[in-house]
């Protein structure tokens, strides 16, 4: 599956300033593993102990992966992944 | 030594009982704040011109500081204002209007309360400056600068270089945002800081995970963007349940809920009157030998050379640190390893979230893992040489980290230990509330602020503008500055606590006065005209507090005031449609009628000449310090 990943500004220092990366993968974890191979250091910014960080939101198209199958969420050809920090107040 | 009135022996003198009508709410809040701090309030003449309201702040150890409050930063501009006119002119109506349906006033004396707090803080800071050898005798703030400060992070989001947000009033169809309404008509907030409880809660109600996920994305937007476009399925599903069932489901799933309560209900709470009498800060001091901080040089700011260690996330705590930095303090911000994730929250400006930068741009960053013993040792080392330690951790978190007041005061007895909390200034006594996240929207609901705003706005709940986070940040910074002055004067170190709830008490202090001491309450009349009107192009806000102002309006617009009030309002609405808002405001300003073009797009603020002294443009538009010292 051909997937477009939108890289947040905060991770661009690790990806040679690339805003978008094209990846072929079947699920979200595979996408992150493949980015990690090309650009080491990205994975630890997103995942600890097999889970996405509490303060990181990963969306497939517009859907938060926590509300699908998390990092195992499967992907369709042409899907786009967006990574954003989460915010709460107080 | 315990002392909760740290400015006993200090005094403010000014036209506190009879200021120009523009400043009457500010004067009333100043009287309340000053009395709560133990100060004597003496009524005197206004020592400034009519363009300003000024009072003197005196301590037994310093010469008087003239504290000036102006309407605008641009000293040449004398156009009369009111609370609501400033809200219209400086973008608050715009931010509140994003989710409330249209540009409209908050319905609380927000800018006036904030201006009063900043004005008093300016006098206190200037006195600290004097005790440190600075020649400063005058501090000024403007209502416009206070208003712009309160929406600084929204202005940042709207003007960021990379993908700025365009969020205009009425952008979200009503009522697709919290609060929610149960089958038995209870209006309530839901809150959780994690996706897990949210997901479980909606699954229990039978909402699909995908729709719940859409709702979560919208829910997270509240704090950043003042909108929360909830899927209709969520609102419909929850409307089928009784509130008692919703409370049960919250208990099962880990979600928190709070009904929207009235100020009257809040006033009945056991702690409310005490908090109201005490003021929004709780102080506790202990004598210490070390007291006088290093002296400062000629052009420095009052807090230059003082060090603040800040371990805070989100809005209230970071804004408190930001205000102390604007007074000159060196603020060292503790962030988790890898940095605060909110640095990456779009829209971005030069590699950092514009909204984040708006609250944190003057700070030095130290990445520390406060959960590790090495990290705690690092914090303690910083604290040893610091003047202030400020945190906003969840209740009960400081002690297990060995970073509570007791531990840090043992290292540095002259330290001011500050906590900017959510629910209460005294964590222990209010433990039943402490289990709920003490966030802006929950405390708006619990305190009565949400209901008051709803009543004025024709909505069901409070504002998605983070009303209490922003004012709470100012209150925390003010409490710290007061504690620092007390340290300089009386050789003490200590603790100052404030909370979003205590901030709500400050914001509603007049309402509580009416309930607790009706005999001492000034009778305030409702304005004759107080509305936002559509014009041929744009909206204008007009407020006429009295008959004389209404007569000036009628004369300027060449209309007659009849006995038929409704007919007059209709005539006015029709007439205003014939010209643009800018054209009308020119006419009304000449007639000295409080009025303003309603700023709907926050990017317009930087193009308005009389707001420019408070703003600087660049990779995003920044709001500069509200204080001027000389």
Image (tube, coloured by chain):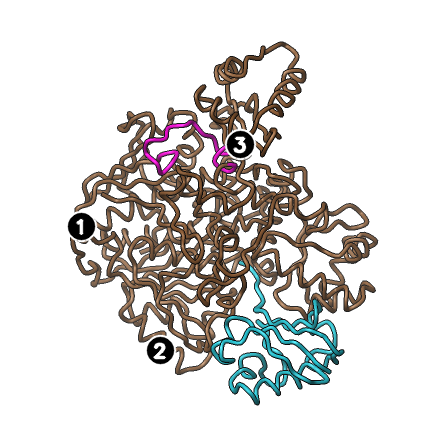
Is B238 located above or below residue B59 in the figure? Answer: below
Magenta region's main secondary structure? Answer: loop
Indicate the position of residue B60 as horizontal and vertical percent values: 20, 42
Q: Chain of mark 1?
A: B
Number of the label disc, if any, that sits on residue B514: 3
Q: Secondary structure at mark 2?
A: helix
Q: Which residues are magenta?
A: B70-88
Query: How far is mark 2 from mark 1, CA to CA?
Result: 32 Å
Label 1 SS: loop
The tag earlier along the polypeptide, 3 or 1, is: 1
Depth check, mark 2 against mark 3: the one in front is 2
Res. B425 mark: none
Marks 3 and 1 close (CB-CB < 8 Å): no
For residue B211, what is the image quadrant?
A: bottom right
Residue at image mark 2: B378
Identify the hue of chain B: brown
Most foreground residue, B4 or B394: B394
Tell me the shade of chain A: cyan
Evaluate if marks 2 and 3 touch, with contact meaning CB atoms under 8 Å apart: no
Q: CA distance from mark 2 to mark 3?
A: 49 Å
Q: CA distance from mark 3 to mark 1?
A: 42 Å
Q: Is B71 part of what is drawn in magenta?
A: yes
């Amino acid at each position: 599956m051909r997937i477009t990943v939108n890289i947040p500004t905060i991770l661009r220092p690790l990806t040679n300033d690339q805003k978008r990366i094209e990846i072929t993968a079947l699920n979200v974890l595979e996408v992150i593993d493949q980015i990690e191979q090309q650009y080491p250091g990205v994975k630890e910014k997103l995942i600890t102990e097999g889970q996405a960080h509490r303060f990181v939101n990963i969306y497939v198209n517009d859907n938060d992966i926590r509300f699908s199958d998390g990092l195992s969420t499967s992907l369709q050809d042409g899907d786009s992944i967006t990574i954003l920090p989460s915010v709460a107040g107080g | 030594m315990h002392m909760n009135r740290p400015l006993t022996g200090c005094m403010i003198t000014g036209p506190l009982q009879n200021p120009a009508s523009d400043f009457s709410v500010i004067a009333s809040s100043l009287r309340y704040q000053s009395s709560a701090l133990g100060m004597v309030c003496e009524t005197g003449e206004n020592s400034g011109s009519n363009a300003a309201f000024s009072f003197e702040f005196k301590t037994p150890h310093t010469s008087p500081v003239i504290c000036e409050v102006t309407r605008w930063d641009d000293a040449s501009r004398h156009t009369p204002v009111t609370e609501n006119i400033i809200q219209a002119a400086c973008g608050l109506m715009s931010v509140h209007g994003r989710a409330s349906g249209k540009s409209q006033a908050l319905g609380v004396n927000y800018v006036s309360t904030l201006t009063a707090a900043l004005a008093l803080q300016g006098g206190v800071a200037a006195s600290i400056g004097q005790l440190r050898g600075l020649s400063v005798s005058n501090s000024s703030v403007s209502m416009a600068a206070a208003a712009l400060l309160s929406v600084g992070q929204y202005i940042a989001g709207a003007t960021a270089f990379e993908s700025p947000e365009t969020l205009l009033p009425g952008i979200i169809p009503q009522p697709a945002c919290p609060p929610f309404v149960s089958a038995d008509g209870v209006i309530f907030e839901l809150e959780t800081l994690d996706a897990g409880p949210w997901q479980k809660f909606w699954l229990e109600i039978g909402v699909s995970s995908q729709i719940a996920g859409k709702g979560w994305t919208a829910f997270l937007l509240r704090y950043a963007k003042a909108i929360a476009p909830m899927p209709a399925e969520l609102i419909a599903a929850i409307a089928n349940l009784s509130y008692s069932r919703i409370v049960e489901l919250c208990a099962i799933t880990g979600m928190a809920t709070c009904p929207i309560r009235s100020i009257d209900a809040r006033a009945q709470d056991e702690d409310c009157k005490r908090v109201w009498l005490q003021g929004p800060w709780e102080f506790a001091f202990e004598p210490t030998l070390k007291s006088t901080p290093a002296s400062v040089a000629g052009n420095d700011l009052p807090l230059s050379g003082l060090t603040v260690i800040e371990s805070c996330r989100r809005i209230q705590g970071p804004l408190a640190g930001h205000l102390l930095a604007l007074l000159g303090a060196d603020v060292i911000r503790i962030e988790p390893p890898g940095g605060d994730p909110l640095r990456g929250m779009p829209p971005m400006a030069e590699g950092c979230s514009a909204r984040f930068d708006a609250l944190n741009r003057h700070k030095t960053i130290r990445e520390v893992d406060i959960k590790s013993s090495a990290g705690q040792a690092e914090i303690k080392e910083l604290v040893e040489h610091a003047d202030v330690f400020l945190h906003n951790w969840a209740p009960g978190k400081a002690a297990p980290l060995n970073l509570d007041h007791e531990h840090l005061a043992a290292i540095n007895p002259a330290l001011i230990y500050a906590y900017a909390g959510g629910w209460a200034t005294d964590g222990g006594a209010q433990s039943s509330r402490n289990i709920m996240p003490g966030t802006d929207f929950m405390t708006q609901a619990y305190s009565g602020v949400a209901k008051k705003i709803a009543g004025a706005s024709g909505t069901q709940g409070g504002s998605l503008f983070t009303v209490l986070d922003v004012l709470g940040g100012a209150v925390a910074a003010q409490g710290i500055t007061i504690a620092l002055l007390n340290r300089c004067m009386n050789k003490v170190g200590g603790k100052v606590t404030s909370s979003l709830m205590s901030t709500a008490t400050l914001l509603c202090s007049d309402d509580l006065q009416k309930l607790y001491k009706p005999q001492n309450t000034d009778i305030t009349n409702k304005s004759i005209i107080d509305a936002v009107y559509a014009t041929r192009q744009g909206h204008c806000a007009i407020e006429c507090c009295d008959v004389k102002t209404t007569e000036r309006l009628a004369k300027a617009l060449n209309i007659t005031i009849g006995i038929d009030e409704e007919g007059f309002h209709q005539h006015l609405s029709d007439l205003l449609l014939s010209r643009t808002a800018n054209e009308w405001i020119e006419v009304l300003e000449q007639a000295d009628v409080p009025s303003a073009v309603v700023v709907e797009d926050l990017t317009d603020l930087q193009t308005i000449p009389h707001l420019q002294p408070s703003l600087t443009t660049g990779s995003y538009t920044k709001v500069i310090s509200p204080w001027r010292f000389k």
